[in-house]
């Protein structure tokens, strides 16, 4: 009989060991206890939606439902965040809510990225961004207690961060000035970056110059350029700013929060603008979530909301430097 070739079996084991799985479970329990004590309702919303995020920086996984009730086929998208569903709950009178949700983003895999990951997302009617930042500090101090030393985050404006680290002001200096700084200080600059658009140069310098220079500890960066508002309110002042913040802990981006935009017409205009940018970049146009816009028209309470990457939080608590070691099965093990 002919010899049979032995075939190597794929590695079936989880990436996270038992100790880290136990740590995850403990941290999830602490999150739930924190919000229960504060009267914040845990909710559970779908992962499949008819609308998709139009943000050009994000790509949704697309699928289709075929079966009764749709007359053929219905396009659906795995959500990149539970935000639209949660805001529909807010508009329906839910009060403060939180969710631990699995979310999906195509094209994102690496040391700190997996295409499926967990977000801790919550919304606080009546909170401004400063009050929500206070609550984030309180949550992290409780969830990380005994695991790592978490001290309340210092607060720094986006504008001051750039001025301190580059000497350039995103509200006043030219694209040419930021391009010249990048060409002088970075080892390489993508040739594809548009010469006359500011945001790509700001993002390049933020990720390759500012973030690597963050001191140990936690920092909230707040008051972003209006062009980066996404779903945040704009505060009109001599130099208008988007009421948005991000949290970095030991140099790792951990959270993204907004003073939530409530104006349906403005939000619809931003979605249309996103799709024009997608078209210009050769990306597929995506359907706008009309039910979410209808909820805004009905009335969204004045709120602030934030999403925290829970897997990255586990990485920090466990002292591991790859997301594969913080989740049971990453993409490489699926």
Image (cartoon, rainbow, N blue to C red):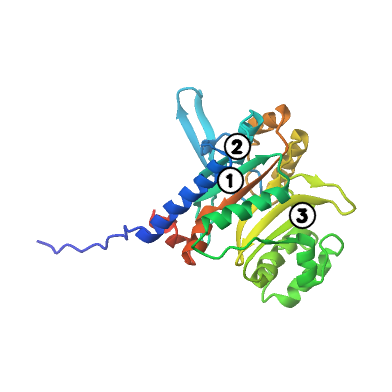
Mark yes or no: residue 167 visible: yes
The x and y percentages for residue 308 are 58, 52
Q: Residue furthest front?
A: 37
Q: Are marks 1 and 2 in contact (CB under 8 Å)?
A: yes
Closer to the chain start, of discs 1 and 2, is 2
In three-dimensional space, the C-alpha distance between marks 1 and 2, rounded to whole angstroms, equals: 9 Å
Q: Is residue 191 visible?
A: no
Which residue is the site of mark 3? 223
> 47 or 282, which lies in front?
47
Label ID, residue 86: 2
Mark 1 burial class by Cα count in 10 Å: few <14, some 14-19, many 20+ = many
Q: Which mark is residue 121?
A: 1
| The N terminus sits in image quarter | bottom left
Task: Return the disc, 1 or 3, that comes first in the chain's sequence.
Answer: 1
Q: Position of residue 4 (x, y in %)?
A: 17, 62
Secondary structure beneath dot 2 equals helix
Q: CA distance from mark 3 to mark 2?
A: 24 Å
Q: Could you tell me which secondary element the residue under label 3 belongs to?
A: strand
């Amino acid at each position: 009989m002919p010899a049979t070739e032995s075939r190597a079996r794929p590695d079936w084991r989880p990436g996270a060991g038992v100790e880290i799985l136990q740590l995850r479970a403990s941290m999830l329990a602490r999150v739930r206890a924190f919000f229960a004590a504060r009267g914040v309702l845990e909710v559970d919303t779908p992962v499949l939606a008819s609308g998709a995020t139009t943000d050009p920086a994000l790509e949704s996984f697309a699928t289709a439902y075929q079966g009764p009730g749709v007359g053929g086929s219905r396009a659906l998208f795995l959500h990149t965040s539970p935000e639209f569903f949660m805001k529909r709950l807010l508009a329906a009178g839910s009060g403060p809510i939180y969710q631990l949700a699995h979310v999906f983003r195509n094209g994102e895999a690496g040391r700190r990225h997996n295409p499926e990951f967990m977000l801790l997302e919550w919304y606080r009617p009546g909170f401004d961004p400063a009050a929500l930042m206070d609550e984030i500090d309180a949550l992290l101090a409780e969830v990380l207690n005994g695991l790592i030393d978490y001290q309340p985050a210092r607060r720094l404006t986006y504008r001051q961060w750039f001025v301190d680290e580059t000497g350039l002001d995103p509200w006043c200096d030219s694209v040419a000035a930021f391009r010249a700084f990048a060409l002088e200080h970075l080892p390489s600059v993508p040739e594809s970056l548009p010469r006359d658009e500011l945001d790509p140069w700001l993002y390049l310098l933020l990720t390759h110059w500012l973030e690597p220079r963050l001191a140990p500890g936690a920092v909230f960066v707040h008051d972003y350029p209006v062009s980066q508002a996404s779903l945040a309110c704009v505060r009109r002042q001599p130099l208008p700013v988007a009421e948005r913040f991000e949290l970095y802990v030991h140099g790792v981006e951990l959270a993204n929060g907004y003073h939530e935009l409530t104006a349906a017409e403005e939000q619809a205009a931003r979605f249309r603008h996103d799709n024009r940018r997608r078209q210009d970049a050769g990306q597929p146009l995506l359907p706008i979530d009309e039910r979410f816009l209808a909820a805004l028209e009905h009335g969204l309470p004045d709120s602030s909301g934030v999403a925290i990457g829970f897997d990255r939080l586990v990485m920090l608590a466990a002292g591991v430097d790859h997301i594969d070691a913080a989740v049971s099965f990453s993409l490489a093990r699926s």
